[in-house]
Image: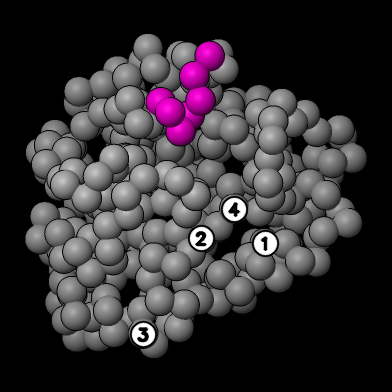
Amino acid sequence: MGGIGARRIRSVHRLALSPACWGVNETRDWGHQIDAERVLSEAAAVGEGAITAGPPGFLPDRSDHAKAMLRRHRLHVVAGQVHAVLHHHSIRGPELAHIDGHAHWLAAIGAETLVLAAIPERHPVRAHEALLSNAEWAHLLHLVGSVEHVCARHRLKLAVQPRFGSIIQGPKEIERLLVGSEAGVCLDIAHLVIAGADPVEVIELTAGRIQHVHLNDVDLDLASRVRERSLDFKDAVARNLYRPIGEGGAEVRRATEALRGAKYRGWYTLEQETRLSTRDDRPLGRVSRSLEFVLPLLA
C-alpha cells in the first residue's frame, strides 16, 4: 500500500470525495451509473487521494480485490455508510449481523469510520411518517450501543448520521441520541437543511461528538418542497436539489467556520447526491466547482 500511503500526505485538507457526486447510488432506477474505474480515476485526478466507500457493489465485495483497485488509483477509503433498522427488537440479530459484516469489510480496506443511518424500514412506503414509541427509541439507542461495540472490535469510529427521511433528522432526535448513547455523529449539511434544521445550531449541539462531516449545498426552494412533501427527494435530486458548493443556500462557509470554532479535526466528505440522465452527463465539472469553493475554507 505504499502508493496509498504516499498519497495520504497530500490530504492536507482532510477532504474525501464521495462516489455519490458521480451519480453512484444503490437505489433502483436512480439514473445512469458510471463504472467504478472511471469514478476512481476522476476522483484521483481532482482530489487529494481520499474517498468514501460508496454503496454496496460499487467496490468489489472481496476486500483484497477492493484494495487492489484502490491501490491502482492511489486512493484510500476514509469512511463507509450502512443503513439499518435499529428500532425493531425482533430483527435486532439480522440487522446487527448486517452491520458487523459491513464493518469487517470497511476495516479490511483501511477505512476509519462507519457512518450509520437509522432507517424506518428496509422497503419503506411512507417512511417519513415513522414516529417511534418510547420502547422503540429504547431499542434503537440500545442497538446503537451494540454497534459501538462492533465498531470498537473492528477498530472503527462510529458516526450516526441525522438524515432526512430517517429516524434521526433534526435537533430533537439528535439530542435524544446524544443523551441516550455515547455514539459520535456525522453531520450532513444538506440533510440538516432539508430537515429544517440550522446546521450551525446542530454543530453547537453536537460539539465534541462530531466524528465525520458531509459537505454539500442545496437549492433552498427545492429543499423546502421536499421537506413539505410536495416533491419527492429523488425527483428533487434530478432537478438539481444539490448545487455545487457556494451556489446554493446552505451557508457552507458559516458551517465550516462553526466547525473550526468547535475544534473539529476529523475528515470532511464532498457528498453531493447526483442523478445522471444519460451516459453523456459529465459530473466532474460540478465536483471541480465545489472543490474550488470549499478547499480555501478548509485551509
For the residues labelled 1 and 3, say whether their Cβ atoms are less than 8 Å apart.
no
The disc, 4 or 2, on the residue closer to the chain's N-terminal end is 4
In whole angstroms, how far apart are the C-alphas of marks 2 and 3? 20 Å
SS label for mark 3: helix
The disc, 4 or 1, on the residue closer to the chain's N-terminal end is 4
Q: Give the vertical position of 111 relative to 296 (above or below).
A: below
The disc, 4 or 3, on the residue closer to the chain's N-terminal end is 3
Q: Which residue is mark 3?
A: 65
Q: Position of residue 100 (x, y in %)?
A: 64, 71
Q: Nearer the viewer, mark 4 or mark 1?
A: 4
Residue shown at the point (48%, 29%) measured from the top left: 233
Quarter holding residue 94: bottom right
Circle 3 Cα neighbour tier, 10 Å, few/some/many (<14 / 14–19 / ≥20): few
Residue shown at the point (68%, 46%) measured from the top left: 123
Q: How many marks?
A: 4
Q: Position of residue 200 (x, y in %)?
A: 41, 24
The disc, 1 or 3, on the residue closer to the chain's N-terminal end is 3
Q: Give the vertical position of 170 relative to 168 (above or below).
A: above
On whether residue 251 falls in the magenta region, the answer is no
Task: Look at the image and give the residue range highlighted in magenta.
Answer: 230-236
Q: Which residue is mark 2?
A: 114
Residue shown at the point (71%, 70%) measured from the top left: 97
Q: Is residue 268 visible?
A: no
In whole angstroms, how far apart are the C-alphas of marks 4 and 1? 12 Å
